[in-house]
Amino acid sequence: MPNVIAHQRVIDCATRLFGELGYDGTSLQLISDSLGVDTSAIIEVAGDKCALYREVMEQAFEAERAMLEASVARAGPGRSAVHDIVDGYLDFHVANPQNRALWAQRSVADAADISELEDRYVRPLFRLVARRIRDVVPPDVDTYYLLGTMVWCVHGFLGSGLFNRSRGMRKADDPAAVESFRAHLHVLMERLLVPQAPPPLDATMINASV
């Protein structure tokens, strides 16, 4: 086997395999076989499997961070900012299914021995968005839960789709399904942004005040 391979080609192949099979289900040998090179070539340009996985997750994070920073920067005023960020997040993950696949693997305890990635990569993104929208989130709604709802819904839809009313499933490879889901997601976010109604005034208190 040849022993010369471009660094980014290794990362791209590992990203695909880690997303499809998980870190635990992907060996360095499988990556090298997929690329048609010796494992020594992989190690030379990207390190061992753990180092390769960390770089894959770093690149996935950087792509998502750039998207969210841009979404936050161009978001409109008030509660429209939430909807602008929702659109940016959904569009990014529709266009970059490998990112969702990597995090979906971690949600089933893949690479459990590399446990710090959520704090290192996910927490800063939540903080970035939370700072931008906190002024429009009502006091009875937790901002992190609101963002979590967006993430759970988007990843759930992209991962499994939704039932069609008649038969079959509506999935992210159908642009009309994506737009239908987007409309639902906007309604859901809008409902979460509606402040809790104040309790009705006690009649005795009203009479006592007049």
Image (cartoon, rainbow, N blue to C red):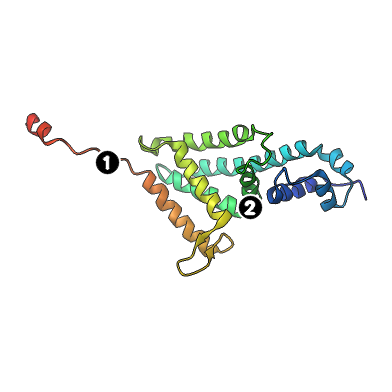
Tag count: 2
Residue closer to the observer: 69 or 127 = 127
Q: Which of marks 1 and 2 is nearer the N terminus?
A: 2
Q: Where is residue 98 in the image (x, y as percent from the top left)?
A: 66, 50
Q: Position of residue 55 (x, y in %)?
A: 73, 38
Q: Quarter of the image holding residue 7? A: top right
Does residue 53 appear left or right of residue 95 in this picture?
right
What amino acid does circle 1 point to? Ala
Cα distance in 3D space between marks 1 and 2:
39 Å
Q: Quadrant of the C terminus?
A: top left
Please, is residue 91 above or below residue 53 in the view? below
Q: Quarter of the image holding residue 204? A: top left
Does residue 58 appear left or right of residue 37 in this picture?
left
What amino acid does circle 2 point to? Pro
- Within 10 angstroms of label 2, few (less than 14), some, or many (20 or more) residues? some
- Give the residue at x 87% y 52%: 36
Residue closer to the observer: 72 or 167 = 167
> Which disc number belongs to residue 97?
2
Q: Where is residue 77 in the image (x, y as percent from the top left)?
A: 42, 42
**Looking at the image, which residue sits at the far right?**
1
- Within 10 angstroms of label 1, few (less than 14), some, or many (20 or more) residues? few
> Which disc number belongs to residue 26?
none
- Give the residue at x 43% y 52%: 186
The residue labelled by disc 1 is 197
Please, is residue 177 above or below residue 150 in the view? below
Q: Where is residue 208 in the image (x, y as percent from the top left)?
A: 8, 29
Please, is residue 196 above or below residue 2 in the view? above
Check whether the beta carbons of the residues at disc 1 and disc 2 lie within 8 A of each other: no
